[in-house]
Each structure stands twice: as C-alpha cells, then as structure tokens.
C-alpha cells in the first residue's frame, strides 16, 4: 500500500506567496554574497568576471572566490534545511536537527580525524567518514537521550545532543590545535566557514547533495503519515520503522555533506523548518522545499554579515549563525511555542 497524505495536514493562506518570497530571498542573498566583501564589486565588474574573464583582480575575485563561496553556501544551506525538516519529521521532535542531534559535530570530528591521521583532504575522500561520524553521534545521542522511563523526550534529546556535540567539538579542537599544518588549513572550517570554498569541492559535493535530496523527497508523504502516530502510519502503509531509518540516512547524508562544505554550522537546520511550518503549515510537500530555501538565504546572509561587521576582517559563519540561532533555540526550549509537527 502506498502512503497517502493525511487530510488533516493543513496549509496556511501564506502558502501562495511563501515560496515565491523565499525564492526572492535566496536571489537577494546570492547577489549580496557575490558583491559584498573585502573587495566590493561594481555591477560592471561582476558581469565582466562572470561573462568576460580577463584575469584582472576583480575577475579573479568573482571566478575564484565569490562564485565558489556562494555556491557552497547555497548547497550547505539547502542541505541543512532539508536535514532539519526530515529530522524533526521522523523523530516527531520539534527540537531535532543536525546540530542538536550531534550529526554536524560527529561528521566534523570524523573528517578532522581522517585528515589528521590519513592525510585525506579531498571532499570525495573524507565525506564518507563524515557520514559515519554523523551516524555514530546521532546513535549516541539517541542512546543517552532515550534512557529512562519517559524515553526520548525533546528536551532530553536536546540536552544529550548538546553534551555529545560539546565532547566531539573538544575532540576536534584538540586534533586541530595539536597539528600545526592542520590548524593552518582548517582552523576556520572547524568553526564553520565558507571562506576556503573551492569550485572543485562544490562539484565533488553535488552527487551527495542529489542523493540526500532524492531520499528526502521520497519521504514526503511518509513523513506526513508518521506525524499522525505509529498506528495511523501503519494503517496508511507508511511503515514507521523503514521511514525512520531512511529519514535518518537522509539526515546523515545531507548534514555530512553540508559539514564537508562549510564545517559544523549550528542552528540553521533547527530554525529553518520551524519558520517554514509557521508560513505554510505542516504538510511536508511545502515544508521541505521552503526549509531548504530559507536555510539557503540564512546561510548566505549570515556569511555576508560576517564579512561586513568587522571589515576588512571576517567573522566565520559558524559564529554568526550561532548568534542568530541561539536565542531562537532558547526560546523554543523555554516556551515550546513551536509550530506543530
């Protein structure tokens, strides 16, 4: 039997304009990401760099700095938004996300460990270890957060995720600080940064992004069914166990790829799905694409903000995203005024 979308899932009046508005947000953020930085670019320099490369400084900035950085931000943001929406859907936990479940920190720790001990520096080489690290971290969070009589409550999972993430982040920092070469190459990446994005890395990430996207889209109707509860989901043929395993695989692939591109960026995957549900309701056919778009815009705008706050120096995106997302996370924990799943 094929799962069908439950009739009770609601859409809001804002659905008609939410997606076009989110696309507009992404376009504006993309333009700002291309123009703003230590070397501001005029419209003419931007057009010349993209269409008529002559090798001067402005063209070099466009081709080798701004385009890779912007594409990496779009891919990382889209991955984090989808991963957060799927994580919250399969766990029925409004506080779930690739950051709060420890997936980002686990992926980063595994990648740094491989870079440090095996010298594997390409994304295609170390991203597999990132997937493994993210999966192990998520399993550890569930094992810790699910202990006790009341099981895996949202707050217990959030606390377990914070503890596991802190432990893995400390491990990652230790590896980087003890290796001078590794520190020179990845000191910004371990915070969360797009500054060292390269077009080669972006192209290597594309197959993994597409794989995660296919998994997430394939789950759209089943996530709606799982949100109704175990018995109803089984009645609709959704097979909750299979849906959860597939969903967590999608989360690991998407969050691991985002971490390989931009480092462990927190809160984006938590906040974007909540904003999406506030705008379009709970049906995942709208929540998934809108979460991805909002996360793309948030990542790029956070990166742009980091370039201009203390210009010509930069604040890494992991810091700016945490400054924006931290208060929202605390608000969700304290008030529970989250959009229903």
Image: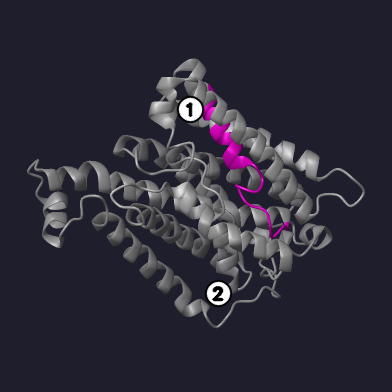
| Above or below for 201 versus 116 | below
Residue most toward the front? 310
Dot 1, how many residues are within 10 Å of its Cα: few (below 14), some (14-19), or many (20+)?
Answer: many
Query: In screen coordinates, is 267 left or right of 199?
Result: right
* Disc sitting over residue 310 in the figure: none
Magenta region includes residue 107? yes
* Disc sitting over residue 279 in the figure: 2
Residue most toward the right? 149
Instruction: Please tell me which residue lies in front, 108 or 330.
Output: 330
* Disc sitting over residue 126 in the figure: 1
Residue most toward the bottom? 13
Local secondary structure at mark 1: helix
Please report contact status of discs 2 and 1: CB closer than 8 Å, yes or no: no
Identify the image quadrant of residue 299: bottom left
Local secondary structure at mark 2: helix
Calculate the distance from the C-alpha at mark 2 to the C-alpha at mark 1: 37 Å
Q: Position of residue 157 (x, y in %)?
A: 75, 49
């Amino acid at each position: 039997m094929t799962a069908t979308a439950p009739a009770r899932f609601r859409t809001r009046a804002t659905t008609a304009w939410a997606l076009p508005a989110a696309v507009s947000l992404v376009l504006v953020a993309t333009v700002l990401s291309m123009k703003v930085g230590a070397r501001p670019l005029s419209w003419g320099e931007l057009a010349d760099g993209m269409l008529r490369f002559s090798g001067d400084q402005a063209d070099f900035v466009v081709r080798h700095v701004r385009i890779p950085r912007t594409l990496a931000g779009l891919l990382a943001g889209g991955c984090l938004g989808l991963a957060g929406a799927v994580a919250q859907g399969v766990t029925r936990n409004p506080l779930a996300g690739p950051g709060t479940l420890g997936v980002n920190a686990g992926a980063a720790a595994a990648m740094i460990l491989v870079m440090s001990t095996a010298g594997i520096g390409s994304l295609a080489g170390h991203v597999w270890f990132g997937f493994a690290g993210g999966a192990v971290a998520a399993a550890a969070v569930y094992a810790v957060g699910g202990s006790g009589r009341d099981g895996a409550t949202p707050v217990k999972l959030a606390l377990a995720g914070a503890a596991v993430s802190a432990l893995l982040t400390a491990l990652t920092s230790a590896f980087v600080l003890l290796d001078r070469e590794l520190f020179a190459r990845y000191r910004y990446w371990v915070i969360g940064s797009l500054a060292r994005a390269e077009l080669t890395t972006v192209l290597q990430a594309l197959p993994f992004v597409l794989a995660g996207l296919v998994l997430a889209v394939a789950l759209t109707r089943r996530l709606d069914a799982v949100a109704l509860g175990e018995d109803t989901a089984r009645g609709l043929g959704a097979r909750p166990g299979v849906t959860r395993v597939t969903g967590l695989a999608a989360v690991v692939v998407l969050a691991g790829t985002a971490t390989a591109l931009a480092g462990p960026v927190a809160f984006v995957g938590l906040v974007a799905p909540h904003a999406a549900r506030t705008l379009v309701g709970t049906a995942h056919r709208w929540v998934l694409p809108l979460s991805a778009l909002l996360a793309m815009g948030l990542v790029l705008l956070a990166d742009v903000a980091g370039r201009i706050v203390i210009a010509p120096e930069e604040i890494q995106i992991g810091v700016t995203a945490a400054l924006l997302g931290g208060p929202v996370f605390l608000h969700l924990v304290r008030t529970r005024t989250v959009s229903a799943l």
